[in-house]
Image (tube, grey):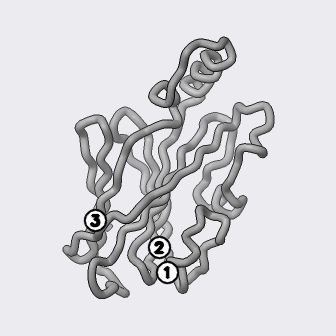
Amino acid sequence: MVIKLEALFWGHEKFTDGAAVSILNIEKEFANAFWRFNAIYLCNAGIIIDYCKKIKKEDILKFMDNVTSNQAVNDEDSPFTFDQRTSLKADGRQLEFSHGCGTSINPYYDNPEKHLELPDSIIEMYKLGGSDCGWVLTRDLHLWNGDPITDPKKIEISLSATVREDITITL
């Protein structure tokens, strides 16, 4: 399948001419959290990967209670903050991490629609709806580092987090 990514989806439109998409929907437990690797996009600049972390309802509500009760909170206290990085190899070639961006879905805001930045088509395609949890969705771009690989036979995705535990997924 070849698509054109929506320009509103974090502004990667300059990298997405004729992007080929592979929907993954691979789910893994990692660093005490539930992760879903949603899709990869092969484009003129490299490979874009979309992945997300599920945020438990009780973690969100506890954090929101602390915020509303005016307790001192910082970014590290938020269940929506995490420090991770993907690494990609295509047919054995290490791709260069360029940049990433992310957004979150918190269904417990008084008006959750005003906090959503994702198109409905992405929420449906990645199955991020519902009110039993929240999500942090991240998009990372990895550059080809040479000639593009138009039809990679093997893609390896590694995720590293602040917890000293790494996972690797091979497609």
**Front-most of 138 and 146?**
146
Query: Of the numbered discs in the image, which one, if any, rests on residue 123?
Result: none
Q: Position of residue 118 (x, y in %)?
A: 67, 56
Residue at point 64%, 13% (across, down): 70
Q: Amino acid at mark 3?
A: Glu
**Front-most of 166 and 43?**
43
Quarter holding the N terminus is: bottom right
* Residue 104 left/right relative to 155: right
Residue at point 37%, 65% (across, down): 98
Q: Amino acid at mark 1?
A: Ala
Q: Which residue is mark 2?
A: 41
Q: Position of residue 104 (x, y in %)?
A: 59, 44
Callout 1 touching callout 2 (CB < 8 Å): yes
Q: Which residue is mark 3?
A: 156
Q: Which residue is mark 1?
A: 20
Q: Amino acid at mark 2?
A: Tyr
Callout 3 touching callout 1 (CB < 8 Å): no
Q: Secondary structure at mark 3?
A: strand
Q: Secondary structure at mark 1?
A: strand
